[in-house]
Amino acid sequence: MVSRDDQVESVASVIDQAAQASSKFEATRALRMALLSGTPSDVPVAEIPDLPVKAALWAFDYRISVEHDSNRQRVVVEPRFRGASGETDPPKVAAVAEEVVEVWHALTSKVASPWGLARLQHLLFERRFGRAHEHAIAATESYLAAAANWEIGLDRAKLLGIALRVARSVNSNDQAELIVSQLMGDARQELSGDGLRPGVFMRLMESILAERNPPGGVDDLLEDAFIEYTDPFIRDNVLRLQIARASDAEAKKGLWGKLVEVWSEAANHSQGLVRAAHLKKALECAEGSQDRKLIERAAANLQSLRKEDLGLATFTASTGIDDAEIERFLAPISGAGNWQQALLGLYQIYGPPTGDLTQNKARVEQHAREFVLGGLLSKELLGGDGLPRYRPQSDEDRDAMALAEQESYNIQIFAPILAMALSRAADTYGIPSESELAEFFAQTPLTDEDLAHALARAFIRYWAGDAEGAAFTIIPRIETMVRNLVIAMDRGVYRIQRDQKPGQYPGLGYLLDILKVHGMDESWHRCVLTVCANPAGGWNIRNEVAHGFIVNMGMPAAAVVLQLAVYLWSLNGSPDDADG
C-alpha cells in the first residue's frame, strides 16, 4: 500500500513536470491530464478517493485575478464554477476540508517549481493557515520566480500583478518595490520590442498605476506608448490613464482635447458606420471633458454626417394576400352601416396594429431561444437623420428593444390594411363634411370644439389624398387627448417655472404610463408608445416628425396615427354611436 507521503511526493513531481510548459494554460492542462490519467471522465473531482490528487486538482482550479475595488486593486480567489443555487466547484477556499488544506501544506515542502509553489502558498495565505503572513511572503517570492521563467507576456504580467497585490496586503514593501521595478522594466522592454503587444503593456501599466505612489518614469512610458501605438482604441486607453494622473486643470483639458482629436482623426480615415461610430466616440469623450467648446465642435462633426454617408443597405420583403382575404378584412367596414360606425370600427374591429402584448412577448421569447447568437450582438438605433439615438445598457433595455422590434414588424404588416379600411369607409359612405365630423368628435366630454374640428380636418386631408398633411396635423392632437385624459383624473402633472426652466408638462411616455396605471389596455398602451414615443425602438414618429427627420409620410403610416387618434378620443367618454 502506497503511503500518504509517497502519494504527495508523486503529485508534487507531476506539478513540477507540468510547470515546464510555456504558458499557464498549457501548464494547467498538462497537470490536469496527468492527475486524471486512468480516472473515468464522469467522476467528479470531489469523489476522487486519492486525497493528494483531489487536493492538487482543486488547488489549480481556482481563478486568481486582480480586480478593481473602489479605485484600488485587490486579489480575488474564486472557484472555477459557481451554480445558480450558490454551489461551487471547487469549494470556496474557506470551506475546503481541513485534510485538503493539510495536503496543500505538505505539497509546499515537496514541490520545487515556482509556479506550483506560488499557487499553493497563496491558497494557504487565503485560508489563513498557520502563519499566514509567511505564506504570503513565500507566495510573492514564488510568483516573482515563476514570472522570470516565462517570457514577457500576459501570463507574466498577470503573475507580477498578483504578486504585487499580495505583497502590499501584508506590507512587504521591499518585495513590492522589487516587483514594481520588474514591471517597469518589462513595460520598457515591451515598448522597445519588434512586435507590438499593447495588451501586455496595458496590463503591466495597470498594475504599476494602481500603486499609491507610482515610480518616476511612468509618464514618460505613457507618452512613448501614445507614439508607439497608433490604434485609436489603445490610444484612448493610454490617454485616459494620463488624464487620471493629471493634476493640473490645463494639462487635463489638453489631454481631453487630444483624446477627442484621436477619434476625430480615426473618423477621417474611416467610412460608413465605422466613421459614424468614431465621431460618436469623439462626442462622448468631449462630454466627459465638460468643455463646452470641445463638445460643440465634436457635436458639429457628428451632425455633419448624412444618411448617404453611412453606406447602409436597404432590404425589402413583401408578402402576398389574395383579394378574397383582403375583402374579408374590409368587410366589417363595408357593412358598418354608416361612416360613424366605420370610424369606430377602426379600433374596435382591428385592435392595435402592434398586436397583442402577451403574444408579442411570447414571440420575442421564442425568437431568443431559437436565435441565440442574435441576442449576443449589440445593436444601436439610428434616427431619421442617420445619427445614433439609442443603445441598450442592460438586459431590460435589450428586452424592451426586442419587443419594440416585434411590434414594429406587426405594424408594417398591418398598416396597409388600415389604410385600405380607412379609404373603404370614404368609398362606401362618402366623405363627410368638416362640420359633420366635428359634431361626431364633439360627443365626448373632453373634446372641445377646437379639438373636434382639428380631428375632422385631419381625416378630410387623408381622404382628399394628403396623407402627409393628415399625419403631421394629427400627431400633436394625440398628445392633446392623452393630456386631457390625465388631467381629467385629477393628476397634477404640470410643472411651473423653476429658475430659467419654463413651465411644462412631462413627456408623452410619462403621461401614457399614468393612463396604464389607471386601466388603459396594455396592448393599446404599447401601441401608442411604440408608434409615437418609444426610445427603445419602434416608429417614435412624434419626435421624428417634430424634428423634421421624416421627409414623406405615406398612407399606411398616416392611417395608423389616425386610428390611434380615434381610439384615444373614445377614451374621453362613451360616444353615442359606440354601442355597435
Image (cartoon, grey):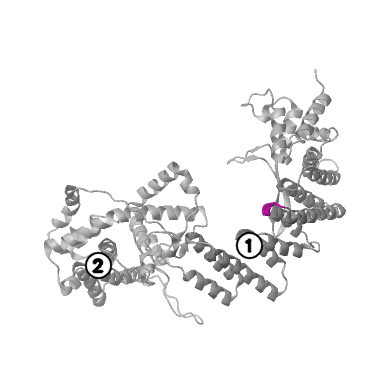
Above or below for 574 versus 16? below
Q: In the rendered image, is residue 519 in sight?
A: no
Residue 371: where, in percent of width, then height?
44, 44
Task: Say which mark, if any, is on residue 7.
Answer: none
Query: What amino acid is labelled 1 in the image?
Result: Asp
Q: Main secondary structure of the magenta part?
A: loop
Frontmost residue, 539 versus 274: 274
| Residue type pointed to by label 2 | Ala
Could you tell me which residue is drawn at 62 percent across and 59 percent down? 231
Task: Find numbered disc 2 in the image and state the secondary structure of the residue it sits on.
Answer: helix
Count residues near mark 2 (Cα–Cα under 10 Å), then give few for <14, some for 14-19, many for 20+.
many
Magenta residues, as a range? 194-199
How many callouts does the rendering have? 2
- The reply, left or right, for residue 483 in relation to residue 107 is left
Element class at badge 1? helix
What residue sits right under mark 2 in the picture? 467
Location of residue 66 in the rendering, given as x and y in whole percent from the top left corner: 71, 50
Q: Which residue is mark 1?
A: 236
Residue sitting farthest toward the front: 194
